[in-house]
Amino acid sequence: MIDGLTSQLRLRVRSWLGRIRVRRTGFQLFLFVTFSLCMLFSVFRILIHGGVNRYTDKSSTDSRLSMIHLLNDHGVYVNYFGNLTAGNWSAWNVTDKREIWSHPQLDILHNELPSFLSNFKNPCWYEDLREANVYQFNKYTVISRNIRTTMTELIKEWATRIAKDRPARRLRCLPYFLIVGQPKCGTTDVYRKIVRHPDVINPPIKELHWWSRNRQGRRLNYTDIIPLSDYIDMFDMAAYHIERRYARDPEIEKPEVQYHHTITGEASASILWENDDWFHFRENEGYTEPRYTSADYIRHVIPRAKIIICVRNPTDRLYSDYLYFTKTNKSAEDFHRAVTYAVGVYQNCTERHSVRYCVYNRTIAYLSRVRLRLGMYSVYIKDWLKVFPPDQILIISLEDYAKHPRKTLSKIYKFLDVRILDGESMRSIAKMKTANKRKKSDRNVGAMLNETRRLLNEFYEPYNQELADILEDDKFLWEPEENDYESVEDK
């Protein structure tokens, strides 16, 4: 009996050991195949890229390994590693944070500017094309898939031109109009309805934020600037369509001298108010308030730019801003606490300094959780009216726009000097779905507390009065109507 059990046990052990040998052999084979594939991939990378990546480059005490993102000729978004400060990747122009503010391309006021073509309504000019992939090092490609898709299409067009034309060239354009502010004042909806006009072409994305933050590289954590040429690239597709609008018309004998009345523009709601890095720029050194703001830079580069500013009751704007940008634990009580603190911060500041000093001081702004300064419209608008003539600035009240969309749109189109549309076309555009309506979850938070509204109305009253005086229009007083505080975003 025992011998039989022993024999069965021996047989089971031998069978188990045999299976282990087979599995071990299979596992060894798997490791061998995996290792071989990895080696082949490494050799392939070396052959393609011409050498091994310098992961341990110690050629300079200032060297640092960084990953950058480049758009190749096929529109594929590729990661590259390289030493960005020791002389490599010179086309990328990466700059040390300490050197960023002395970068020559930040000195917009002294840079050479193009001469705009007289037969184009939009500010445009021609540049020679020497290669198809002119966007390889454009830093905006990290921001949006739409940008990368657009540039891929343009690369193909430029390759065709280079093969066919001698010399090849492309039309370059800057925006004809800019919606510069303010957030939560209907800028997105206004922009969408402007670009629905057949004579207006939009860039790949609405908000480029170049004038306010991206030119000095905030999106890149201040490791490098985004040059003006990268910003202009964003309008290349619009320029392509502006150029072709009449070129294919068989009734025109000389399309090259035809007047092109199509325009393009952008809407970065940060341009009006966000000058938080002003003190870093050389032209502002030694001042306690900015001598130059975004208004000065835009006026210098695009002298005839049309500026659109959207405003609304600043009290309502702030609450909408709070609900939109606060992600958790939103409540009327929390908003009241944040407002009370912010009002105290600005009142303390204006007791010792000028209002303009406090509005442009980012340290003061970052002390509070609500963006109280964005509703102090008169401070910003005065700076813009010092630079631009009044006929180049249009200020829109969101309350008027919500009540009379067609009338306001007609006013905007007239300001932009685009053709008048027929009644059916205007009705179709005016009835488009409203952009950025308040979310249901935010509506469920309810209205702000009455004491919060009284506090904000009292704080904003002198700035509203100043704006009404500047524009000679009492509607900008936003005097409260009794028990009528329904947000225009909810209508």
Image (tube, rainbow, N blue to C red):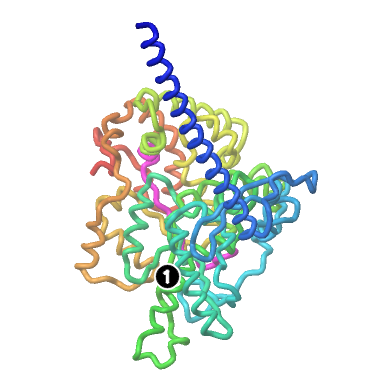
Q: Is residue 293 visible?
A: no
Q: Hey, which residue is sitting farthest top in the picture?
A: 2
User: Residue at left 33%, top 49%?
Assistant: 398
Residue 449, located in which quarter of the rendered image?
Answer: top left
Q: Is residue 219 left or right of residue 475?
A: right
Secondary structure, mark 1, is strand
Residue 63 location (% of width, % of height): 75, 46
User: Residue at left 26%, top 30%?
Assistant: 444
Q: Taking 92 as reference, is 362 above or below it?
A: above
Q: Which residues are magenta?
A: 300-317
Q: Hey, which residue is sitting farthest left in the picture?
A: 424
Nearer to the camera, 363 or 440: 440
User: Residue at left 44%, top 41%?
Assistant: 375
Q: Taking 221 as reference, is 430 above or below it?
A: below
Q: Taking 128 as reference, is 67 above or below it?
A: above
Q: Which residue is mark 1?
A: 263
Nearer to the camera, 61 or 377: 61
Tell me the crowding category of disc 1: few under 14, some 14 to 19, or many 20 or more residues within 10 angstroms, Cα based. many
Magenta-drawn stretch contains 313 = yes
Residue 487 location (% of width, % of height): 28, 40
Residue type indicated by callout 1: Ile
Residue 5 location (% of width, % of height): 37, 11
Q: Is residue 429 left or right of residue 16?
A: left
